[in-house]
Image: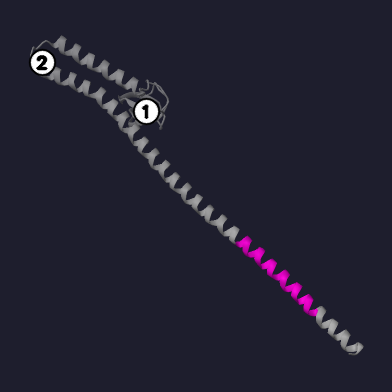
C-alpha cells in the first residue's frame, strides 16, 4: 500500500471513529433528554393530581362553611323566634282577659312591652328616636312632611311619627319624622 492510501484509510477510520463517538454522544443526550422528559411528565402528573385534590378540598371547605353559615343563621332566627313567641303568648292572654279590669290589662301590656325591650336588647336592636330640634339625618330619618316652624332651624326634626330601629349598625327602619321648613 502506498503512503497515500494509508493516509486516506487512516482518515476514513478517524472519520468512522468520530461518527461513532458522535452517535454515542447523541444517543446519550437523547437518553438523558428522554429521562428528563419522563421525569417532567411524572412531576406534571403529580402536580395535576395535587391541583385536583386542592380544588376538591376547597370545594369541601366552601360547602361546609356555607352549611355552617346556614346553621348559624337558622339558630339565630330560632332564638329570636322563641323570644318573640313568648311576647305573642302575653298578647293573646291580654286579649282573652274578660275581667274588664283596665288597670290589669294595662299592666299586662306594659309587661309585654318590657319583655319586647329585653328581646331587642338581647338581639342588639336599638331605637332611632330623634328629639325635637335634632338635625335631619337622611341615613337615620325619613321626612314624612315639612311644616312651617318659626322657632326651629330648617331641616330639623319637629316631631317623630314613628321610631326607627338599627341592627348592628344597619338601619332596619328609618325614623319617620316631621321636619321644619
The kind of secondary structure element at disc 2 is loop
User: Which residue is the site of mark 2?
Assistant: 97
Residue pointed to by mark 1 = 167
Q: Is residue 34 above or below residue 79?
A: below
| Residue 89 disc label | none
| Element type where label 1 sits in the image | strand
Residue 156: quadrant of the picture: top left
Query: Looking at the magenta stretch, what is its main secondary structure?
Result: helix
Query: Residue 149, how many percent across, how many down?
Result: 36, 24
Crowdedness near tag 1: few (<14), some (14–19) or many (≥20) residues, C-alpha within 10 Å? some
How many numbered circles does the render carry?
A: 2
Residue 116 is situated, as x and y percent measured from the top left of the image, at 27, 20
Q: Quadrant of the N terminus?
A: bottom right
Is residue 18 part of the magenta span, yes or no? yes
Q: Residue at x 34, y 24 (%)?
A: 123
Q: Residue at x 37, y 27 (%)?
A: 166
Q: Which residues are magenta?
A: 15-37
The answer for how far apart the CA atoms under marks 1 and 2 are is 34 Å
Foreground residue, 28 or 132? 28
Q: Is residue 47 above or below residue 13?
A: above
Amino acid at each position: 500500500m502506498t503512503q497515500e492510501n494509508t493516509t486516506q484509510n487512516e482518515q476514513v477510520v478517524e472519520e468512522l471513529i468520530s461518527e461513532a463517538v458522535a452517535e454515542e454522544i447523541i444517543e446519550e443526550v437523547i437518553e438523558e433528554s428522554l429521562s428528563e422528559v419522563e421525569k417532567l411528565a411524572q412531576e406534571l402528573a403529580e402536580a395535576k393530581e395535587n391541583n385536583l385534590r386542592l380544588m376538591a378540598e376547597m370545594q369541601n371547605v366552601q360547602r361546609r362553611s356555607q352549611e355552617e353559615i346556614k346553621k348559624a343563621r337558622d339558630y339565630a332566627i330560632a332564638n329570636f323566634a322563641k323570644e318573640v313567641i313568648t311576647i305573642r303568648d302575653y298578647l293573646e292572654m291580654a286579649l282573652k282577659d274578660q275581667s274588664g279590669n283596665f288597670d290589669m290589662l294595662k299592666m299586662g301590656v306594659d309587661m309585654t312591652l318590657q319583655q319586647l325591650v329585653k328581646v331587642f336588647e338581647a338581639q342588639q336592636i336599638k331605637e332611632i328616636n330623634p328629639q325635637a330640634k335634632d338635625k335631619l339625618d337622611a341615613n337615620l330619618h325619613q321626612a314624612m312632611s315639612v311644616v312651617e316652624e318659626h322657632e326651629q332651624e330648617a331641616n330639623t326634626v319637629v316631631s317623630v311619627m314613628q321610631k326607627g330601629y338599627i341592627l348592628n349598625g344597619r338601619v332596619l327602619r328609618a325614623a319617620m319624622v316631621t321636619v321644619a321648613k
